[in-house]
Image (cartoon, rainbow, N blue to C red):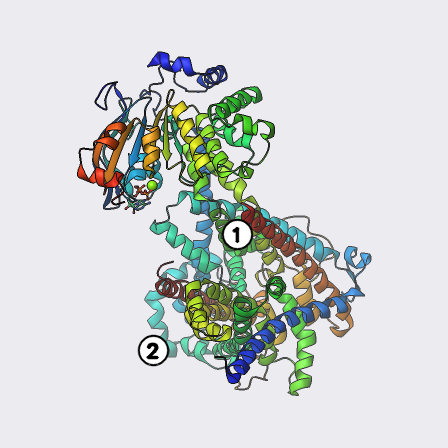
Amino acid sequence: MTTGPLPLQPKISTSTLSVLYGAKAAVKNVSLDIPANKVTAFIGPSGCGKSTFLRSFNRMNDLIEGAHIEGSVRIDGVDIYDRGIDVVELRKRVGMIFQRSNPFPKSIYDNIAYGPRVNGIRDRKRLDEIVESALRRSAIWDEVKDDLGKSALALSGGQQQRLCIARALAVDPSVLLMDEPASALDPTATGKIEELIYELKDRYTIVIVTHNMQQAARVSDLTAFFYLGELVEFDETRKIFTAPSHRQTEEYITGRFG
Amino acid sequence: MVTKKRRLIGAGVIGISAIAALAIVGIVAAVTGTIVAGGWSTLSWEFLTAAPSEGMTAGGIFPAIVGTVFLVVMMSIAGVPIGTVTAIYLCEYAGTRSVLARGIRFAVNTLAGVPAIVFGLFGLGFFIQFVGGGIDRALTGGAELRWAQPNILWASLTMALLTLPVVIISVEEAIKTVPQDLRAASLALGATKWQTIRRVVIPNSLTGIMTGGILAVSRGAGEVAPILFTGAAYFLPHLPTALSDQFMELGYHIYIMSTQSTDVDATRGIQYATTLVLLLLTFLLNFSAIYLRSRIRARQQRS
Amino acid sequence: MRSAISRSVDPAFAQHLNTVSTMKQHQHEATRLLTRADLRKRTRPAEFIAETSITGIAFVSLAAIVMIFIFAFREAAPIFSQPDVAAGQVQAPIEEQETYGEEMVASAPESAAPGKESARTDRDAEEGATLENLLGSVWQPVSSVPKFGLLPLVVGSFKVTLLAILLAAPIGILAALFTASFAPRWSREVLKPTIEILAGFPSVVIGFFGLVTLATLLQSVFGYTYRLNAFVGGVAMSLAVIPIIYTVTEDALNAVPKYLTEASLALGATKWETALFVTLPAATPGVFAAVVLGFGRAFGETMIVLMVTGNAALLSPGIFEPVRTMSATIGSEMAEVVFGDTHYTVLFLIGAILFLFTFSLNAVAEIFVRKRLLRRFGGG
Ligand SMILES: Nc1ncnc2c1ncn2[C@@H]1O[C@H](COP(=O)(O)OP(=O)(O)OP(=O)(O)O)[C@@H](O)[C@H]1O
Ligand SMILES: [Mg+2]
C-alpha cells in the first residue's frame, strides 16, 4: 500500500471546484483526486456541502434552477462540464444511490430493467440476464428471485435500497455515488449494505457520503472531511481516524461538534 | 373550568354550523328528489330514442342526447390532449421561476374563473366571425354563408377552450403528485427527460390526469351559456351530419322547453325528464372522477 | 489491479458484462475508462420531436388564451371609435368594422365632443352608444329609438349577486367550519361527496329547479307579486355559489397550522372557542378569497338568472321585482342581433365588462390573498 492518497491516475479529479446556488457557494474551491476502485467517504457536519459536491460528479445539480459551478470536474481525464459533453451519457456511467430509497412503483423486474430499457434493450432473454446478474451483484437475488413480478414497494427498506443499487448496476456504470445510502436503515440492513459496498469496490469506484463515523471507518479506503463547503482534510481513512492532521477533523470525528 | 354559559354558547355554535352543513345536504336532496320525482314517470326507452314531435310537446329527446354526446366528444378531443400537454410543458419544461411560466400560470388560473358566457362571446367573435368568415371569404368570396354561422364545430371548440384551464390546472396537480425522487432516480439512470416523462411521470399520474379530464368534460357537458349562440338549435328534425350543422343539446333543450316553448305547463314532464337525463349524464362523469380520485388517494396512502 | 478485478467477477456477472458491453454506444469492458467519445453529444430524434411538439402545443393553447383576451375586447371596440355606429352601418363589410379597434383610444374623447354631436342631429334618432346613452337608465335596444342604458343591467347583476352571497356565504363558511373543526369522521364522509354533487349540478339544472320549484315555493311563503324576481334569482344562485365558498374556506381552515389550534386547546379553550377565535381568524384571507371567488362566479353566471329573474330590465329598488342581469342580457339577446350593429357591439361591451370585472376579482383572490396567507404562515 502506498502512503499518499494517489496511487494511480485518479478516476475523478476536481480542481478548484466551487458549486453555487445563486450567489451562495455551497462548495468552495475544492481540489480533490479520487482513485479508481476504492471507496472514498465524504464526512462533515450537516449542510457542509457533501451532497452538493457528490452531485456535481454526475451533474445532478444541473436540475436545480440557479445552480452552477466554477472550476472543473474530470472523470478519467475528461472534463464533464465541457460543452460537448452529453449529460445523459455521463449519468449512465456515473450511477447514483440516494438517501431515501426511491424504487419506481413497478415490479422488481421492471425496476432493474428500467435502465437497460431506456438504453434500447428490448430482448427479453437479455433483459432477464441483466436483471439476474444485477440482483446477484447486489446480494439480493436469493431474497427476491421467486417474486420478480412483485411490486418493489412491498420490499423492506433495506431491500429497497439494495434494489436501487442493483438498478444502478444494471446500466453498468464505473462510478457509484452513494448519498447516505444507509441512513434510513436499521443496523442489520446497514450491515448488508456495507458488505455490499465492500464487494463492489473491486469493480467500481465508489464515493459515499455518510454521517456515521464507524461506517466511514469500516467501508472506506479514503476519507475527505468537509467543513462549511471547504475541504479540510483528505487522506487514508486509517490515518484520518487515528492521526488527523487538523484539529477540526479530530474534533468532528471524536464527536465534539457536528 | 367550563361554565354553563360557555357550554351553552358552544352548543349553539356547533349547532348552527351543523345546521348549515345539514342545509347543504338538504338542498342536494331536494333538487335531486324533485327532479327524479318529476321526471321518472316520463322517462322511458321511447323518450330516449325518439325525436320531439307535435311541435315539441310530445316525443323524446334523442337528437338532444346525440347532440350532447357529439359536443362532449368533440370538445374532449379538442381540449383534453392540448390541455394535458400544456400542463406537462408547464410542469416539466417551463422553469418554475421563468417570468413566462408564471405569467401563463396566472392567466390560466384567472381564466378558469371567467364566466362561461364570455367564452360564448369569444366563440362568436373569433370562431364564427373571424375564422368562419375568413373561410367563407376564401371559399366563396363571402357569397355563401356556410362557416360564418353557428355550428357544432364552433360550439365544440368554444367549449374546449372553456375546459382548457380546468384541464391544465387539474393535470398539473396530478403531475405534481409524482415524487421528485422518482424523476431523480430515472435521470440518474441515464434516462432522458422525455423518457422520464413518458415512463415515470405520465404512468404515475395517469389516474390523476384522467380524473382531471373527466371533471373538465363534466363541467363542459353541463354548460349551456357558451353554446347559446355558437351552435345550439331550438329544434332540428335531423341529427347533425356535418361539422357545419347546428345541433340540439340537452341543457339548451331544458332552457328552451322551460322558458320559451309554446305551452310550458303542458311539457313539464318532458322538461323534468330531460333534466333528469342531463343530471344522470353529469353524475356518471363526476362519479367516475371521484372514484378514480379515491383510488389514487388509497394508493398514495399505501405507499 | 486488473487481475484483482477479474478474479472476483462471478460467472453470471461476466455474462452480464458481455451483454451490457454490446449495449448501444457502450465502452469496451476491458478498460472501463471513460473517453471523450463516450460522452460526446448525441442527437436524439425522439427527444427533439417530443420536446418541440410539447412546446409547440403548449404555445398553441397559450395563444388561444391570449386570443380570448384580445377578442373579448375587439368586438366591443367600435363603440369607442364610432359614436354613431347605427342602423346605417349594418351593411358595412365586416373587415371594415374590424379595423376600428386600432383607433379606439385616439378617438374616444371625440365621441364626447358636443360639436360633433350637434352636427349629426339628423341621425340622433338612430343614435347608438354614446357615453350618455350607455350611462342612461333605460335599456331598450330594440325600439325605434334604441336606448342602451347599462344601469339597470348593472344594478340587476349586483342585486342578484349580493343576495346570493348573503345567503351562500354564511351557509358555506359555517358548513366548512363544521367539517374542519367539529364534524365527526362519518359526517365529513357524507358532506364532502354531497358538496361535490352540488358543485356538479349544471347551472341549467339549478335554473330549472329555481324556475319550477323554488319560485313557486318562495312566492307562497313571501307572497310577492311577481313569481320570478331578483330574490328568487339570488336564492337559486346561492346553490351555485355555496360549493365554491365551502371548498375554498375549508382549504383555508385546514391550512391553519396544527400548533396554533393545539396551543389553544392546551390552554384550556374549548373546541368551539378554538374554532371561532383561533382557526377562523387565522384563515380570514382564505375566507375572504372564498367570498370573492363566489362573487365572481355569481356575477358571471348566466343560465340561472336567465331562467329565474324574470328578465325585465327595470331599474327598481326592491328585491322582489323582476330584474335582468348583464350576463342574461347577452344570453338572451345575442342570438337575435345583427352582426356588427350597435346592439351587437354593446352586448360585446357588456361581455368585456363582465370579463374585466370577474378577471380582476380572480386576480385579487389569487395574488392578494395568497400572499397574505403565505406571510401569515411563514411561507409554508
Ligand atoms: N437546492 C438547493 N438550493 C439552494 N441551496 C441549497 C440547495 N441544496 C442545498 N443547498 C445549500 O447548500 C449547502 C450544502 O447543502 P448539502 O445538501 O450539499 O449539504 P450536506 O453536507 O449534504 O448536508 P447533509 O449532511 O444534511 O445532507 C447548504 O447550506 C444548503 O442549504
Ligand atoms: Mg446531504
- Label 1 element class: helix
B74 sits left or right of A36 in the view: right
Which of the 4 quarters of the picture holds residue A54?
Answer: top left
Residue A131 in the image: above or below residue C351: above
- Crowding around mark 1 (Cα neighbors within 10 Å: few <14, some 14 to 19, many 20+) is many
Q: Residue at 26% across / 28% down in the picture?
A: A238
Along the viewing direction, whichever of A173 and B178 lies nearer the viewer: A173
How far apart are labels 1 and 2 at the CA level? 53 Å
Q: Amino acid at mark 2?
A: Gly
- Which residue appears at 47% of the width and 38% of the height? B197
What is the number of callouts on the image?
2
Q: Quadrant of the N terminus of chain A?
A: top left
Front residue of A22 and B280: A22
As displayed, is residue A25 above or below residue C6? below
Q: Nearer the viewer, residue B20 or A193?
A: A193
Q: Is residue C331 visible?
A: yes
Residue located beneath label 2 in the image: C115
Residue sitting farthest toward the top: C3
What residue sits 79% from the left and 59% below the top? Answer: B47
Q: Which residue is mark 1?
A: B167
Q: Could you tell me the amino acid type at mark 1?
A: Val
Figure quadrant of residue B251: bottom right
Is residue C32 positioned above or below A58 on the image?
above
Residue C58: percent from left, percent from top:
45, 46
